[in-house]
Image (cartoon, rainbow, N blue to C red):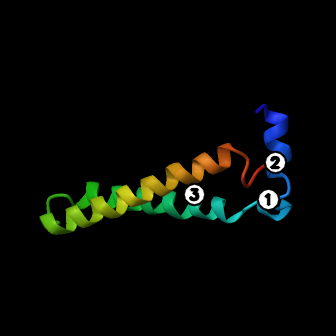
């Protein structure tokens, strides 16, 4: 099956509304970038005074946000929110 045949087979299934721009991806980028930056600053400035359990919790939160940043940047790279 070549690309044209594959596209013809998928055209009746995939609705055009699924290809609309999703601007909320840019919001995810902004929120999680600020979150990672803020957590990093908090840890750097208070690493000697924070208990170990707090450092582990902050590391998990920052790691989750970095993962979301990666997926959101991937979507923006594919043109999910910005076309031109």
Q: Earlier in the sequence, mark 2 or mark 3?
A: 2
Q: Which mark is residue 29?
A: 3
Q: Residue at x 30, y 61 (%)?
A: 60
Residue tagged by mark 2? 9
What kind of element bears circle 1?
loop
Mark 1 burial class by Cα count in 10 Å: few <14, some 14-19, many 20+: few
Give the position of the C terminus as an image quadrant.
Answer: top right
Are the residues at dot 1 and dot 2 in contact (C-beta closer than 8 Å)?
yes
The residue carrying pointer 3 sits among few (fewer than 14), some (14 to 19) or many (20 or more) residues within 10 Å by Cα, namely many
Identify which residue, 50 or 26, lies in the foreground: 26
Q: In which quarter of the image is the N terminus?
A: top right
Q: Which of marks 3 and 1 is nearer the N terminus?
A: 1
Badge 2 element:
helix
Nearer the observer, 8 or 35: 8
Separation of marks 3 and 1 at Cα, in angstroms: 30 Å
Task: Tell me the element at label 3.
Answer: helix
Please tell me which residue is depicted at 36% across the width and 59% down the height of the picture.
Answer: 62
Q: Which residue is drawn at 82% across and 62% down?
A: 15
67 left or right of 39 in image = right
Q: Is residue 12 left or right of residue 82?
A: right
The residue sitting at the front extreme is: 1
- Residue bearing mark 1: 13
């Amino acid at each position: 099956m070549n690309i044209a045949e594959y596209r013809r087979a998928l055209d009746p299934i995939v609705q055009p509304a699924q290809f609309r721009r999703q601007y909320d991806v840019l919001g995810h980028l902004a929120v999680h970038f600020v979150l990672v930056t803020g957590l990093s600053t908090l840890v750097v400035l208070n690493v000697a005074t924070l208990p170990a359990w707090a450092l582990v919790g902050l590391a998990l939160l920052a790691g989750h946000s970095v993962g979301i940043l990666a997926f959101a940047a991937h979507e923006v790279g594919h043109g999910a929110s910005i076309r031109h």
